[in-house]
Image (cartoon, grey):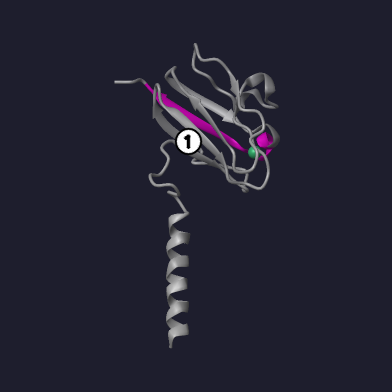
Amino acid sequence: MRGTLNMLAASLVAAFLCGCAGSHAGGEPQANLVKMTNGLKYAPAEITITAGQTVHWKNVALFGHTVTADASLAKRPADVALPAGAGPFNSGNIGLGKEFSYTFTVPGTYKYFCIPHETSGMTGTVIVNKAP
Ligand SMILES: [Cu+2]
């Protein structure tokens, strides 16, 4: 009887920990978070922010990814778009579990890609609205 209760308690604790470790480990969910996945995707592929805000990319895959908005590094230059007045940027390789952050100051539409996975369709978009 006592063993059964202990088992039940253990499974409840496990379920709680499992649920908690999902979207909001460490409290609040992180704002403007894009995950880079094993499926060679940015999730979400498109994110909308306000000028002055920072986007955080987190690599949740088992291999490296990049966040690259530099047409000179693209196999298909059309995979990159930058608003007039915005400079190119490139995270370099982001390892397992690592993050990259970039603060967008110029409003407009940014298209970016992952250097190793560009031709697999790993591309994303950041839409930056003017600050009110
Ligand atoms: Cu990638």
Mark 1 residue's CB less than 8 Å from ligand 1: no
Does residue 55 lie above or below 30 as drawn? above
Where does the C terminus fall, quadrant-wise? Answer: top left
Residue at the spot of label 1: 46
Hey, which residue is sitting farthest top in the picture?
A: 85
Where does the N terminus fall, quadrant-wise? Answer: bottom left
**Type of residue at label 1?**
Glu
Q: Is residue 125 left or right of residue 67?
A: left
Q: Residue at 44% of width from left, 59% of height from top?
A: 19
- Say which quarter of the image contains residue 68: top right
Q: Position of residue 9 (x, y in %)?
A: 42, 74
Residues 3 and 19: in front is: 3
Does residue 34 lie above or below 53 as drawn? below
Q: Is residue 127 one of those drawn in magenta?
A: yes
- Which structural element holds mark 1? strand
Residues 87 and 82: in front is: 87
Magenta stretch bounds: 117-129
Does residue 43 lie above or below 68 as drawn? below
Q: Position of residue 10 (x, y in %)?
A: 47, 72
Hey, which residue is sitting farthest bottom in the picture?
A: 1
- Say which quarter of the image contains residue 58: top right
Q: Residue at 41% of width from left, 26% of height from top?
A: 53
Q: Is residue 104 one of those drawn in magenta?
A: no
Hey, which residue is sitting farthest front in the picture?
A: 2
Q: Residue at 44% of width from left, 50% of height from top?
A: 23
Q: Residue at 42% of width from left, 81% of height from top?
A: 5
Q: Position of residue 22 (x, y in %)?
A: 47, 53
The number of discs equals 1
Q: Position of residue 92 (x, y in %)?
A: 65, 28
Quadrant of ligand 1: it is: top right
